[in-house]
Amino acid sequence: MKVLFATSELAPWVKTGGLGDVAGALPAALRALGMDVRVLVPAYPALLEAFPDAEEIAQPHWLGGLLPTPKLKQALAPDGTPLLLLDYPHYFDRPGNPYLGPEGRSWLDNHLRFGLLSRVAAWLGSEASTLDWQPDIVHCHDWQTGLAAAYLHYLPGRRAKSLFTLHNLAFQGLFDHASLFELGLPDAAWQIDGVEFYGYLSFLKAGLQHADAITTVSPSYAREIQTDAEGMGMAGLLRHRAENLSGILNGIDTHTWNPATDHHLHQTYGARHMDGKAANKASLQEELGLERRADLPLFAVVSRLTEQKGLDLLLAVAPQLLKLPAQLVVLGSGEHSMEHSWTALAQKHKSRCAVTIGFDEALAHRIEAGADIFAMPSRFEPCGLNQMYSLRYGTPPVVRATGGLADTVVDAADEKHGNGFVFGPATTDALLLALQRAATAWRDPKRWRLLQKHGMARDSSWAHAARQYIELYGKL
Ligand code: ADP
Ligand code: GLC
C-alpha cells in the first residue's frame, strides 16, 4: 500500500511539539512493516539546509484560487523514508517557528501557506499528479493539512482515500470567509456539513468532515472529544462520525529516547544498571545552578507553557512542593505571562527551583534522565509523549487522568503494574496530594525501584500503533 503523510512538522528538523515527533517516527515504523510511506512537508530552511541536494521532481500547477505554483523536491531521510519537500520560498523560507512570526503572532497568510500544503497533498492523491508514484491513501495530521480531505472530496476523477489524524482539538485553523475563494474551494463548501464553522472557515473541521476515516492519538481522547464538555464545539460532528473515528495510542522513538544510548546524557544507564541516573541528577543540578542534593526528590517539567498543560496549577502549589522539601526544574516556552510567573518563582527559590525558558532538545533529554519525578498535570492531553519518555528514563510521572495520560500511566496503588501517580480533578489540592504521594514513595527505595522497573519495561515502541494504522489503511 502506498501512503502519503502530509505534515507541517517533522522531527528532528522542525518541531514545536508532539506532532513533529510522530511525523518523524511513525513513517519509518510503517515502512519497517512493508508500507510504502512518503512524507510531504514544507521546505522550511532547516530542511533545505539538511538536504541541499534535493532534486526537483514536479511543479504542481493550476491549484486554484490564489494558490501559487510551487516546486516539489525529493530527498531521502536518514531512516530511509522518502521526503517530498514543498518548496515555495515566499511561503516557507521564513525564520523561526512554522506558524509564528518573530513577534510571536501567527503569519497573516497561514491559510495560504497550509492551504497550499493541503492542496498539494490532494494533487498528489489525484489524477492530476505528474508523479509516477500515486498514493492509495493521503494521511493528514491536524488542522494544517485538514483541508486536503476537503480538496480530495471536491476533486473530480479517481483519487486517494483520506485519513485524518487529530492530534489536538484546540487548534482549529480558523480563517475568515474570504479565504474560501483564495483557497480555490467551491461555494458549495460553505455550509454546515462543509468547512464552515460558526462563520469561519475551519481547516480542522474540513478534515473531520471530509476524511474517509478519522483517528486520534489515544483511545481515551477519542471518547472524551465526543462529549460536549470536551469536544470544543466539534462534539456533535465527532459523534456523527463515531463509526469512522478511533483512537490509536502513539508510540515514541525508542532510538532517540533510550537512556542506554542517549548521547545527550552525562552518563548512560538502563533498568539493570541505574547508577548512571544518580550521576545525571548531580550533573543536572550543577548545570542548572541548583544545590547538589542527592537527598531531595527532583521534580521536572518539559512542556509548552499553555493552559492545556495545567502548569498554572503546578505554579500555584510550587511553594508548598519546594517546602516538602523538594527541587523543581522547568523547561518550557509559550504564553508570556506564564514564562514570567515561572521565572519569578525560580528567582525567589534559587537553590530549589530552576526555570529555563526556551526550546532545547538536548536539555529535555538531560532533564528526563536527571530528574526523579516528572509532572504533567494537563487539563486535557490527546496523547502526550513526555510521560512515555519519563517512564522509559525511570522517572515516574505524576499525571492527571485524562486522554493519553490515562492510557499510559498506572497509579502506584496498583502494586503489580503501577508506574506513576494519577490524580483526578484539575485542582491544586488533588495535584499537591499526588506530588506528595510521589515524594513519599521516592523515599522508599524498594518501592521506588519497582515503580521504575514497571515504567522502564513498558513497550512504547511504534510497532503496535503501526500495525493498527495498517489495519485501518487496509479497511479504507
Ligand atoms: P504537545 O505536542 O502537546 O506539546 P507532547 O508531550 O505530545 O505534547 O510532545 C511534546 C514534545 O515537545 C516532546 O517531545 C517534548 O520533549 C517536546 N518539548 C516541549 N517543550 C519543549 C521545550 N521547551 N524544549 C524541548 N523540548 C520540548
Ligand atoms: C498534540 C497533543 C499531544 C500529542 C501530540 C502528538 O500536540 O497535544 O498530547 O502527544 O499531539 O500526537
Image (cartoon, grey):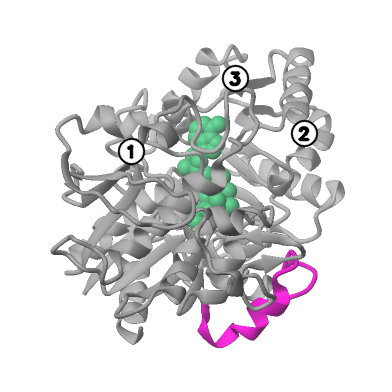
Q: Is residue 371 visible?
A: no
State the residue position of label 1.
Answer: 43
Which residue sits at x=65%, y=70%?
190
User: Mark 2 and 3 residues: CB-CB less than 8 Å, in contact?
Assistant: no
Which residue sits at x=35%, y=47%?
41
Tell me if the residue at label 3 has its CB under 8 Å from ligand 1.
Answer: no
User: Up-down: is 48 above or below 73?
Assistant: above
Residue 384, image x, y percentages: 55, 53
The quadrant in which residue 259 appears is: top left
Observer-nearest of 459 and 71: 71
In terms of secondary structure, where does tag 1 sit?
A: loop
Residue interval drawn in magenta: 227-246
User: Mark 1 and 2 residues: CB-CB less than 8 Å, in contact?
Assistant: no
Q: Residues within 10 Å of mark 2 (few under 14, many from 20)?
A: many
Mark 3: which amino acid? Arg
Observer-nearest of 292 and 302: 302
Mark 1: which amino acid? Ala
Q: Which mark is residue 326?
A: none
User: Up-down: is 156 above or below 180?
Assistant: below
Q: Is residue 434 left or right of residue 447?
A: right
Q: Locate the C terminus and report the quarter of the image it occupies.
A: bottom left
State the residue position of label 3.
Answer: 293
In reply to whether residue 238 is colored magenta, the answer given is yes
Q: Is residue 36 visible?
A: yes
Which residue sits at x=80%, y=42%?
313
State the residue position of label 2.
Answer: 321
Q: Residues within 10 Å of mark 1 (few under 14, many from 20)?
A: many
Mark nearest the camera among 3 and 1 is 1
Distance Cα–Cα, label 2 vs label 3: 16 Å
